[in-house]
Image: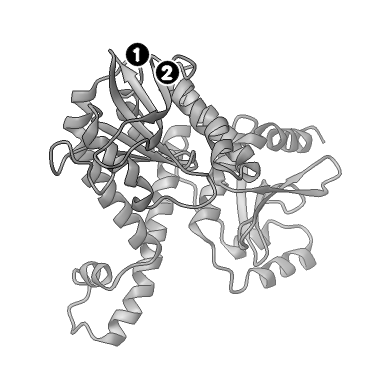
């Protein structure tokens, strides 16, 4: 398996097992040791490569231990501090890393809960661990642009100088991307004013700010949806396909009462970016079975439907995303819906065979 494939396989395992992992030791065994061995390529059972419970006396601190030290050429290269997967990571969790960093030859420190990996170095002051990570790897939402940099820390391609030299750019690019993402989700007053200045020439009063806050949020979500749509169309080699309106959806249904019910249900519906992304994933999966322009969608208050030929009697899937626990609705030969709980959109790919089988059953009928 290639590096990226191994990373994806471990991410899938984490998704499946994360709810049953409750302790730090279980997190190490199930998630972190496989990361060290299968992703970074170090032998976790060879003390010349991976030293668990690494100990070094630091000043008056005697016998303190750090979870793992990764060795290469007889020197400590990477320090790893682990926390249990339940709960987020905070800088205070890295207190031991901070002390050990200055006392060893390590230039890389990792703080992790098995799902999120924060990578630190010493950009701000020599031999002093930075307060902010230069790279954050989230196994629940892998940023593919980080994979080449991560591979530089693997045993077979270890390139410390290269990753340290790129660390400053990685840190700032990562922070900017996270700031943009946060503003796309909930725009700040400064962000709203900045974007509005180019389209509104009047005085920026409180009333105008409130009006444009909603407009900016709506515009950014639509922009992201358009970008996702364009990339998928380019990948599939298909022409642009217009979004299906409620009127067009009703016109294609042969049963008038059903069409009217759908229109009534659509009243006041707010289609989310997550639903659009889920639709594109389902469409990308089943386009191997039927032409992509035959896959349509309709949104309703209780679910987001993906349909074959825009026919409500040919449901491919339903996305129940308007609740804290998300569900993917699948359909068997009897057209009865089975709801599968999911944590992320990536899990839709795990049901690719079932989605294609549903489409094939409609084609065979």
10 Å crowding of disc 1: few (<14), some (14-19), many (20+): few
Q: Nearer the viewer, residue 312 or 248?
A: 312
The residue labelled by disc 1 is 156
Give left or right: position of 169 versus 253: left
What residue appears at the point 69 percent right and 34 percent down from the top-left corner?
Answer: 356
Give the image quarter of residue 104: top left
- Quadrant in the picture for residue 27: top right
Of residue 184 and residue 28, the one placed in the foreground of this image is: 28
Is 160 situated left or right of 50 in this image?
left
| In the image, residue 163 above or below residue 320 | above
Tell which of 232 and 341 is nearer to you. Answer: 341
Residue 223 in sight: yes
Q: What SS does tag 1 mark? A: loop
Q: CA distance from mark 2 to mark 1?
A: 7 Å
Q: Earlier in the sequence, mark 2 or mark 1?
A: 2
Q: Which mark is residue 280?
A: none
Residue 134, visible in the rendered structure = no
Q: Position of residue 266 (x, y in %)?
A: 63, 68
- Left or right of 108: which side holds 231? right
Say whether marks 2 and 1 touch (CB < 8 Å).
Answer: yes
Percent of width and height locating residue 261: 74, 69
| Mark number displayed over residue 41 | 2
Q: Single out the residue that lies furthest toward the left.
A: 125
Residue 116: image location, x then y, percent: 44, 42
Q: Residues within 10 Å of mark 2 (few under 14, many from 20)?
A: some
For the rendered model, the colour scheme is one colour
- Residue 29: where, in percent of width, then height? 56, 30
Q: Residue at x 26, y 48 (%)?
A: 132
The answer to whether 17 is drawn above or below residue 158 in the figure is below
The C terminus, quarter of image: top right
> Which residue occupies 29% across, 14% down?
74
> Secondary structure beneath disc 2?
loop
């Amino acid at each position: 398996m290639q590096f990226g494939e191994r990373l994806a396989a471990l991410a899938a395992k984490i998704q499946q097992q994360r709810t049953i992992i409750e302790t730090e030791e279980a997190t190490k065994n199930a998630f972190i040791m496989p990361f060290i061995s299968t992703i970074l390529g170090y032998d976790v059972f060879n003390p010349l490569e991976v030293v668990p419970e690494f100990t070094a006396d630091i000043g008056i601190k005697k016998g303190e231990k750090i979870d793992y030290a990764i060795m290469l050429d007889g020197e400590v290269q990477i320090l790893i501090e682990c926390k249990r997967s339940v709960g987020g990571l905070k800088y205070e969790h890295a207190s031991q890393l901070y002390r050990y960093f200055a006392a060893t030859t390590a230039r890389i420190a990792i703080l992790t809960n098995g799902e999120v990996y924060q990578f630190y170095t010493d950009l701000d002051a020599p031999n002093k661990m930075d307060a902010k990570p230069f790279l954050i790897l989230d196994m629940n939402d892998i940023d593919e642009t980080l994979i080449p940099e991560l591979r530089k820390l693997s045993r077979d391609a270890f390139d410390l100088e290269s990753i340290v030299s790129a660390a400053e750019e990685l840190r700032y690019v990562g922070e900017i991307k996270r700031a943009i993402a946060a503003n796309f989700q909930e725009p700040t007053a400064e962000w709203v004013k900045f974007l509005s200045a180019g389209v509104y020439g009047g005085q920026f009063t409180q009333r105008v700010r409130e009006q444009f806050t909603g407009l900016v949020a709506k515009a950014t979500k639509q922009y992201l949806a358009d970008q996702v749509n364009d990339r998928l169309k380019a990948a599939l080699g298909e022409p642009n396909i217009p979004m299906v309106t409620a009127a067009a959806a009703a016109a294609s249904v042969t049963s008038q009462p059903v069409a009217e019910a759908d229109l009534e249900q659509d009243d006041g519906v707010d289609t989310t970016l997550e639903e659009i992304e889920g639709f594109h994933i389902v469409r990308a999966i089943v386009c191997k079975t039927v032409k992509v322009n035959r896959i349509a969608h309709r949104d309703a208050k209780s679910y987001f439907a993906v349909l074959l030929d825009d026919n409500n009697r040919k449901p491919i899937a339903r996305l129940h995303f308007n609740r804290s626990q998300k569900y993917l609705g699948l359909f068997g030969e009897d057209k009865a819906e089975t709801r599968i709980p999911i944590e992320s959109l990536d899990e839709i790919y795990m049901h690719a065979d079932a989605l294609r089988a549903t489409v094939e059953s409609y084609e065979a009928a």
